[in-house]
Amino acid sequence: MARQTHLTPEFVELAPPQLKDGVLYVSMVHSCVIHRCCCGCGEKVVTPLSPGEWQLYFDGENVSLHPSIGNSRFRCRSHYWIRQGQVIWVKKLTPAETEAAWRHDRAARDAHFGARQGPQVEPPAPKSKRGFWQRLLGPSEES
């Protein structure tokens, strides 16, 4: 299969078991976008949606994703942007650029999800070592 130049969005709850080339499956329920790698290698690309990961922009017809799709873990090592349904090919990342991108992405996820953590809750008190019947029958002499 040849490189993709355009992706058509299809809004779904779950992506089908067999992904079609040229289709961008968008699951708002599961906050992710799934598609087959645009280079034609057939790998499944999953992009989780959140402020600390990818953002989706929908103009009523086409979809854009930010940041770029860098498939550095795939054999193809493809790298592209999805802008208003168009696949915009960019140079493959070097190993150093890939490492820098991973560090940046990790920091963004940590900043986002760290900010969403609620107040710290004290751990529960340790459970009594008294058996079920002793607890049921009432306070011990230790109380």
Image (tube, grey):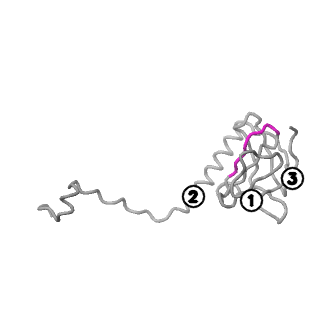
Task: Report the mark closest to the observer, 2 or 1.
Answer: 1
Which numbered disc, 1 or 3, marks the residue that appears first in the sequence?
A: 1
Q: Quadrant of the N terminus?
A: top right
**Side of 130 relative to 118 (left or right):** left
In this rendering, the answer to whether 68 lies above or below 143 is above
- Label 3 amino acid? Gln
> For the magenta stretch, what is the residue range?
40-47
- Label 1 amino acid? Leu
In the image, 36 versus 5, the foreground residue is 36
Q: Which mark is residue 56?
A: 1
Magenta segment includes 61: no
- Label 2 amino acid? Phe
Q: CA distance from mark 2 to mark 1?
A: 18 Å
On the image, the x and y values in percent for residue 82 come to 81, 52
At 77% from the left edge and 35% from the top edge, which residue is drawn?
76
In the image, 40 versus 107, the foreground residue is 40
Q: Which mark is residue 113?
A: 2
Q: Secondary structure at mark 2?
A: helix
On the image, the x and y values in percent for residue 133 come to 19, 58
**Side of 62 relative to 73 (left or right):** right
On the image, the x and y values in percent for residue 98 come to 70, 41
Q: Quadrant of the C terminus?
A: bottom left
